[in-house]
Every structure is written in C-alpha cells, then in structure tokens.
C-alpha cells in the first residue's frame, strides 16, 4: 500500500506541474523571460522612433503628479502645524488647550493650575504646581483644557504648538 501511495503522489505532482507549465505563456508580460529576437526588435523600434510610448506625455504627467504631491505635502505640513510665536503682556495669561506645548523664550511667568493639577515640564520631568515660576526654554505641556497655563509677570515671548488663548 505504501508503494501505491508513493506512485499516486508522484503522478499527482507530475500532473499539476505539467498543467502549470502549459498554462504559462512564455514571453508575455506575465512571464518576463524573453527571446533575443524580441529584445532586438524593441531596440530597433526605439532607435527608429517607432515606440508606442509618447515620452513627452509621460514626462508631462509625471511633472503634474509631482506638483500635486508637493501641494499635498505642503498642506499636510501646514495642518500638522509648527510652533507659533506669541507675545503675552505682563498681567495676561496664556491658557493652553489639551496637549498644547509652550516654550517660554523670554520674560517671566508663573504657572496657572486647575483642580486637576499643574503643567508638565517635560524637560525637567516634573509637574509644575500653580504659583510656581515657569522655567524659560523648557518644554511645558498642558495636559487638559481646564484653565491651565502661564500668567506673565513680565512680558513673555513664547513658542506655542497647539491651541491656546491669551486673556
């Protein structure tokens, strides 16, 4: 019985292989194997200018695509947003929206906290409580939009990414 099984499997494998081999059309787009005469013919067509491809149209289409993609990249960069420069006069408060990032470049301020806590100083890895002096040139993150921010005790120039309001 073992011998019969081996013969049956061998016949099955040979049948499948033969069927697969007869289905492939050699020299077509699905089979990249080509003959020398095919390559010679294509080279002669290109040399004679008899190609089916309008290279000027292809180049124009590619240039149009490049412009469209460049515009999309610019729109995405704008939507993502970078840092904006804002001036907060002494006595004013900059309140951040949820996830806003604030960096004080000049001036002085104190942290305005809420019942939920203060503002995170990512640079030093601490939570700044209300009334604490806000450090310059540190990345401060407002975790929630619940009235947290910075009160300017001296006019501040800040870099802000994300939503904010100045009161």
Image (cartoon, grey):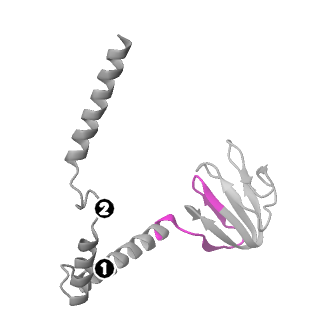
Residue under the point 24% across and 73% down: 37
Q: Nearer the viewer, residue 102 or 123?
A: 123
Image location (x, y in percent) of residue 39: 28, 74
Neighbor class of circle 1 (other Cα within 10 Å; few <14, some 14-19, many 20+) is few
Residue mark closest to the camera, 2 vs 1: 2
Per the image, label 2 sits on a secondary structure element best described as: loop
Residue under the point 60% across and 70% down: 83
Q: Nearer the viewer, residue 71 or 63?
A: 63
Q: Which residue is mark 2?
A: 33
Per the rendering, the mark at residue 64 is: 1
Q: Which quarter of the figure has residue 42?
A: bottom left
Per the image, label 1 sits on a secondary structure element best described as: helix
Q: Nearer the viewer, residue 18 or 20?
A: 18
Image location (x, y in percent) of residue 30: 26, 57
Position of 92 relative to 115 (above/below): below
CA separation in Å, label 2 and label 1: 34 Å
What range of the chain is rendered magenta? 78-101
Residue under the point 28% across and 34% down: 14
Q: Which residue is at the far front?
A: 3
Quarter of the N terminus within the rendering:
top left
Q: Which quarter of the figure has residue 35?
A: bottom left
- Left or right, 120 with respect to 144, comes to right
Position of 7 relative to 154 (above/below): above
127 within the magenta span: no
Q: Which residue is at the far bottom?
A: 48
Image location (x, y in percent) of residue 122: 74, 55
Count of numbered circles on the image = 2
- Left or right, 112 with respect to 165, comes to right
79 within the magenta span: yes
Image location (x, y in percent) of residue 34: 28, 65
């Amino acid at each position: 019985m073992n011998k019969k099984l081996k013969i049956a499997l061998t016949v099955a494998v040979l049948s499948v292989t033969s069927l697969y081999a007869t289905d492939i059309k050699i020299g077509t787009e699905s089979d990249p194997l080509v003959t020398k005469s095919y390559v010679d013919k294509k080279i002669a067509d290109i040399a004679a200018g008899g190609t089916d491809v309008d290279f000027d149209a292809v180049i124009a289409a590619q240039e149009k695509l490049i412009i469209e993609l460049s515009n999309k990249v610019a729109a995405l960069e704008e939507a993502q947003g970078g840092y904006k420069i804002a001036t907060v006069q002494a006595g004013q408060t900059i309140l951040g929206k949820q996830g806003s990032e604030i960096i004080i470049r000049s001036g002085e301020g104190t942290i305005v906290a809420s019942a939920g806590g203060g503002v995170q100083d990512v640079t030093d890895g601490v939570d700044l409580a209300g009334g604490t002096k806000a450090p310059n040139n540190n990345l401060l993150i407002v975790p929630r939009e619940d009235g947290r921010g910075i009160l300017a005790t001296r006019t501040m120039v800040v870099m802000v990414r994300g939503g904010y309001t100045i009161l």
